Image: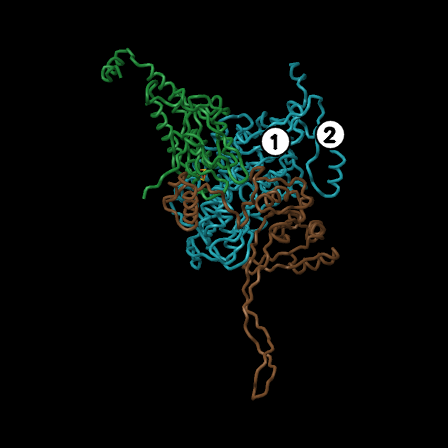
Amino acid sequence: MKTVEEIKAAIEAAVPGAKVEIVPNPGPSGEHSLLLGHEQAVEVARFLRDDPELALDYLSNVTGVDWLDKEVTEKVKVKRQVTKTVDGVEQTVEETVDETRKHVEPGYLEAVYHLFSMARKHGPVVLRLRTGNRTDQVEVPSLTMLWRAAEFQEREVFDLYGIVFKGHPDLRRILMWEGFKDHPMRKDYVEPDDYEYEPTAHDQVLKRAQAHQAQAAAMGQEGAGAGQ
Amino acid sequence: MAIDQELKIEMGKQGVFVTTIQELYNWGRRSSVWPMQFGLACCAIEMIATTMARYDLARFGAEVFRPSPRQADLMIVAGTVTKKMAPQVVRLYNQMAEPKYVIAMGACAISGGPFKQGYNVLKGIDRYMPVDVHIPGCPPRPEALIQAFMTLQKKIDSHHLTGEGRPRYLDPDAPGEFKVPEPGEHDLEPASNQGVWPVPVVIR
Amino acid sequence: MSTFETIPESTSQTSAEHLAERLSKSITAAAEADRREGWNRPPVFLPESENGVLEVAMGPHHPSTHGVFRMDVSVDGERVIRLKPVFGYLHRNHEKIAEGTAYLASMPYTDRLDYFCSLTNNWAYALAVEKLAGIQVPERAEYIRVILAELTRIQNHAAAVGFLLQDMGASGTPLMYAFREREKILDLFEQLTGSRMMCNYMRFGGCRVDVTDAWLDRARRLVAGMPQFVDEFEALLTTNEILMVRCQGIGALKPDLAVNAGVTGPMLRATGVNYDLRKVDHYGIYDRFKFRIPLGDHGDVYDRYMVRILEIREAVHILEQALKEIPAGPIMDPKTKLRGFRPKPGEAYGRIEAPKGELGFYLISDGGSNPYRYRVRPPSMINLTVLEDMCLGHNVADVVVILGSVDIVLGEVDR
Ligand code: SF4
């Protein structure tokens, strides 16, 4: 099978103006993935499916990943002009100083597609689509038109992560009930406080127990027995 | 009891059977408990295995699994009750005709079991309706389900038709139906039925 | 016997041509256009009778034996013209829980995905983690895995056929035969792993406990008796007239749609597509065994039934070879530390041929002790994508049979 670099080159040759980026995978499995731009994504996917050499006719797995906002701390060397008195003469010297900068890398949601070929029996080719952020720009193009296999899986990603697949024919919740508001697989999802009690609470459960207790104490009596 | 046990046995040997209405009634009830054919998750497979040739639940008069709640006496809550499913479970329970019994089979039905931390998992069916027998296990073996059956039969046998200790279905003041929870925006509403489920108090 | 002649054809059986004719009438222009675009959407059926369309919610509590699954069916008379599956009644948040615990702690949860086949689920997860962390598995452990996986396949297929027949109205008998065999296999599992259903047996880089010679002997005896069981089962079912009438030509699936919809497992092979991961991916040591892949050619319920039966026979062949050749040696990779297991950052997608289809695990590690993302690719759920396509135009009674032939387990569909 072709390597990701070759696939990238093939895509760029076949679909003019396609934005493709290789996302390396440092792990031992070495399954690098291709990050697609939104505009040409469907075209690129169609090429991957119909190209006789790749023939990725089988979409195995569709899933979402939630990448939270990351606070990155990095040390940068900054050059500064400093006025100094050297040998009695006032001079402007360049000096390098270490500075710690913090900035927040905005998080995003990601849809990951694993493609295989049943005709040529190879794979996987991993495609990724990223949303703009985690709140209002959560759209990515849907690939259901190309592979029916994506139909339920994209619905599931929509349900659990809140990624909106543009062009999906039937984008409704699939696992949670209609009228449910949250997207529970997101990393910052807060579960409803239906905590009961656990005799040997520890770690996260203990934290939940304490939070529940505090809330119960604030509310008065109801449920006050729980989680002590 | 009005009649002495020894005398009863002695008379039985002579071919004279003496009994009370209560005994007869309970005997009839306990010997023909018809469960509802109602499986939720993994535990249901063990429930099916229990009815198969090897474990043969028919020995207890309970092999007739009814698909309809109207014809069933016993609901075996076999598996994880999720929040999406809980309203249906309670509704099915409400639709069953009295007298009705519930066996909570497996850790999930009792408390949420291994999936207790899940956002969509109900932490025990007894939040919404009364349970007669709990069987622990994940999944409980078929023997455990048979044990639960026998426990239920003992319970039915000990029912009094009148007076203080009579079962719920003979008490006109006791409720036979329970509120069906509504799926809300974040959780089921209400989170438990008042009066059915006392919030447990942990004594340390 | 004039009564037979008066029975209209469509109530007793729906022939494939008859269905094709109805289909060609019913596809609307919009659907036609979509198909040209490449979107394999289900055909649109229009009601024919004047009596109006009846909407039936089949499930989530339904007498057919597949757990809490709902189908919203629109019927025109007896004919299904629309069918939408509704999931989620057993959504147990497996993925969320797994993202909150250590890698090894998810192993028992995988048992509960497809609760008929806990051992193949274990294997798929172990395989994905081994790929993620680059772990080698010793030879003996690979043999044990193959033996257990094929035993699992036998009991799953036997039970699936039993449930299919149960749905068809043969209440009891075939299921009892299937469960009789299943109990024997479960006894083996119990002796080895301590549990009948939830085995929790495999570990990253090997298996938890070693098999004894006594166990292997017992397994050999069981496998030796297995062809006899399959013969008996087949004598009971394969040429049974009622079974043939209710299965042949029902729920036919086209190979191109099956591939496009990501259908895997016996369902895919019943349509004639030769794609079995044991041969394609060469995972484990399947290369060493001689076995054939049964293929169907109509893709209907009967073919699915037949593929399962033949897969049982092939599994018996694999078992015979594996039980003969199993070498001595360690069962765990000595370099793998299960406590404090932290794979390097990266991601991996591991998949195996589970009895129901391709079971995959997609893991992303950020270097911590928990997976950052843990995803199960459930074959049962994705095989249901084509349920509507298979059921359209058939009678309501056939829907239950078609669903039975897909062989789903709700623990895996909803996770
Ligand atoms: S108690 Fe265990 S076996 Fe039973 S439903 Fe729950 S997880 Fe499954």
Identify the residue under disc 1: C72
Q: In percent of the image, x 33 and y 14: which residue is there?
A: B21
Q: Say whether residue A209 is left or right of residue C84.
A: left
Which chain is rendered brown in the image?
A
Q: In percent of the image, x 55 and y 70: which residue is there?
A: A99
| Sequence-first disc among 2 and 1 | 2
Q: Quadrant of residue C251 in the image?
A: top right
Height in image: C242 above or below A58?
above
Res. B97 mark: none
Height in image: C146 above or below C244?
below
Which chain is rendered green in the image?
B
Q: Do callouts 2 and 1 mark residues in contact (Cβ within 8 Å)?
A: no
Height in image: B99 above or below B121?
above
| Residue C193 can be seen in this image | yes
Q: Quadrant of residue A73 in the image?
A: bottom right
Res. C21 mark: 2
Height in image: C276 above or below C233?
below
Q: Say whether residue B156 is left or right of residue A48.
A: left
Q: Quadrant of ligand 1?
A: top left
Rendered location of residue C318, percent (x, y)? 51, 45
* Chain to which mark 1 belongs: C
Q: Label 2 is placed on what type of residue?
A: Glu
Which chain is rendered cyan in the image?
C
